[in-house]
Amino acid sequence: MLVVLAACGGSQKDPTPLAPPPAPDAEPALVFDDDSAQQLADGFLDVLGAMAEAVEARIATCWMPPSGCAADVIDDCPCQVDCAAMAADLDAIFDVSAPLFELAVQVQADDRAAKRAVIAMKARADAAATLEARISDGLIACRGSAEVLEVIERMPTL
């Protein structure tokens, strides 16, 4: 009986099984070309620019101190910085930019997309560094603010 089954093929399995269909709620594959990478990098610069403007707007008077107040000694500067408002401004920027950072997380998970994004960001490295320095300089005025520290901890990072 075994000889007959073996000669007729018996119950052989198909060597190339079909892939299961995608789950109905599965997200579509990431489409991320060079234009997408440029847009992502420009979006990051926009976020950094908005952060720099928000921080500088809140400390503007500290950077124009009266005579006798050293501009680099914020603690001795008589102006008052509204750190709670600075925190709220930054928080709002992070809320608006959340989709951009969600896309960035998806891009990081895809090697080809991540390489494109890195190339686009490297082309903007000098501009990003300038904006980051402006932000860091501005945050000095609120370095002791619990609100600002909490928001900075919330800041999306890559």
Image: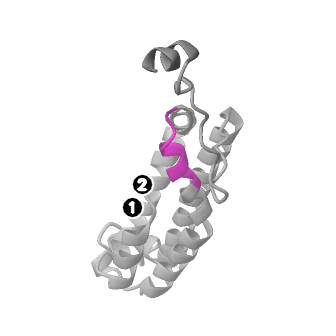
Q: Is any part of residue 147 visible from this angle?
A: yes
Was residue 104 drawn as part of the magenta stretch in this picture?
Answer: yes
Whether label 1 touches label 2, CB < 8 Å: yes
Q: Residue furthest right?
A: 35
Image x and y of residue 132, in percent: 45, 54
Label 2: few (<14), some (14–19) or many (≥20) C-alpha neighbours in 10 Å: few
Rendered image coloring scheme: one colour
- Residue at the image point whose x is 49% and y is 34% from the top: 111
Q: How crowded is mark 1: few (under 14 residues within 10 Å), some or many (20 or more)?
A: some
Disc 1 to disc 2, C-alpha distance: 5 Å
**Predominant secondary structure in magenta?**
helix
Q: Which residue is drawn at 57% across and 33% down?
A: 116
Q: Name the residue under label 2.
A: 133
Q: Is residue 84 above or below residue 127?
A: below
Residue 147: x %, y % from top left: 38, 83
* 87 displayed left or right of 23: left
What element does badge 1 sit on? helix
- Name the element at disc 2: helix
**Residue 72, quarter of picture:** bottom left
Camera-side residue of 135 and 59: 135
Image: magenta residue range: 103-111
For the question of whether residue 68 can be seen, the reply is no
Write down the residue under mark 1. 136
Label disc, if present, on residue 115 of the rendered structure:
none
What's under tag 1, amino acid-wise?
A: Ser
Q: Which residue is drawn at 42% across and 83% down?
A: 83
Q: Does the magenta stretch include residue 20?
A: no
Figure check: 155 above or below 101: below
**Residue 103 in the image, given as x and y percentages of width and height:** 58, 53
Image: 91 above or below 82: above
> In this view of the protein, which residue sits in the foreground, 63 or 135?
135
